[in-house]
Image (tube, rainbow, N blue to C red):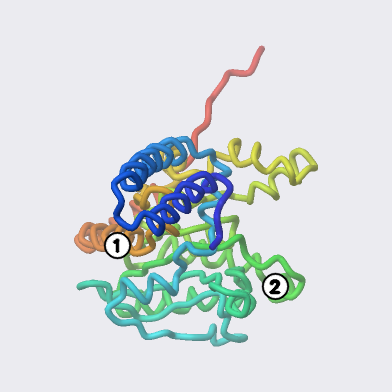
Amino acid sequence: MDILPHEKKIYEYLNAINHLKKQSKGEAVFEEEIHKLEAKLEQIKVDVFSTLTPWQRIQISRHPGRPHTLDYIENICDRFIELSGDRLYSDDTAIIGGLAKIGNLHCMLIGQEKGNDTESRVKRNFGMAHPEGFRKALRLMRIAEKFQMPVVTFLDTPGAYPGLVAEERGQGMAIAENLREMSILKCPIIVVIIGEGCSGGALGMGVGDSIGMLEHAYYSVISPEGCASILWKDPGKNIDAAGALKLNSEDLEKYGVIDAVIKEPIGGAHLDPMAAMDNVKEFILEKWRILRNIPTHLLLDQRYTKFRSIGAFEEHEAEK
């Protein structure tokens, strides 16, 4: 089991409680002590999870037990037909997409997939897409537009693949084209940030009419480690960078970067994946009920205005 640093005390109490339960055999003296420990455990959970730092929440977003795109497909979709390839170079398995049915919603679902074990992580390139991955996503979006279907995207990536082969095949242009085309796509787009939403790799699939973000996910122009390396020349300053970047869900909602924070089970989605996935499904269906009634021309105007108004600035008169 992968235990995060801030969870250690919780698991120590859990182990003590389980040990006592095995030894108790129903004796009253043991039962009383177990009840005391369980009450103490609940208080510890409240204390720990109500005071999480930005860096601790990033650790939660990266937890290997956190549900990924394939987990969502398996658990919230009534039907899914995968579509592969960009029709130009190859199929990028870091991006998975296809026709999906979620409740009464028929949509094109596209997500970034990290993998769950060593073999699948290598196969999926740890969720880091090559140019063909972004072109594949765009191809599927254009199919959705043609058949007047909404698009749902799941963001979960440490960034687009930064290797030489990706640059040789036009990584920057692929992301730029997605930004441009998603901004004028004539169908509703719902974006959900389910884990890491880092850099252009996330934004290349993140232009939408409604953007939801799981409570302990993060969304940032750069990872805390990358930011620390640039600003302080020290990757070890990642904790300071995590706080300075304002990359948590409540900060991003405040600044208008996202539209809604999707609640997670106490402690994070890895502790109760089904509850987190049910909340994401509810968010998607709720937003679809709203977006489906908006005329296309108004939908595009709202999308343009939404992204033009992101950010905050101050004006000062120059000294004469």
Q: Secondary structure at mark 1?
A: helix
Rendered position, 137 above or below 172: below
Which residue was labeled with disc 2? Answer: 166
Tell me the quadrant of the picture where the C terminus can be found.
top right
**Residue 318: x %, y % from top left:** 63, 18
Residue sitting at x 51%, y 52% = 60
**Residue 10: x %, y % from top left:** 47, 46
Give residue 144's quadrant in the image: bottom left
Residue sitting at x 41%, y 42% = 45
The total number of labels drawn is 2
> Which label belongs to residue 94?
none
Say which of 86 and 163 sits in front: 163
First of labels 1, 2 by sequence position: 2
Kindly tell me whether residue 141 is visible in this rendering.
yes
**Mark 1 to mark 2: distance in Å?**
35 Å
Mark 2 closeness class: few <14, some 14–19, many ≥20 residues within 10 Å? some
Rendered position, 64 above or below 248: below
Rendered position, 15 above or below 161: above
Residue sitting at x 64%, y 40% = 239
> Which label belongs to residue 278?
1
Kindly tell me whether residue 309 is visible in this rendering.
no
Tell me the quadrant of the picture where the N terminus can be found.
bottom right
Q: Disc 1 vs disc 2: Cβ atoms closer than 8 Å?
A: no
Pick out the residue farthest to the top: 320
Q: Secondary structure at mark 2?
A: helix
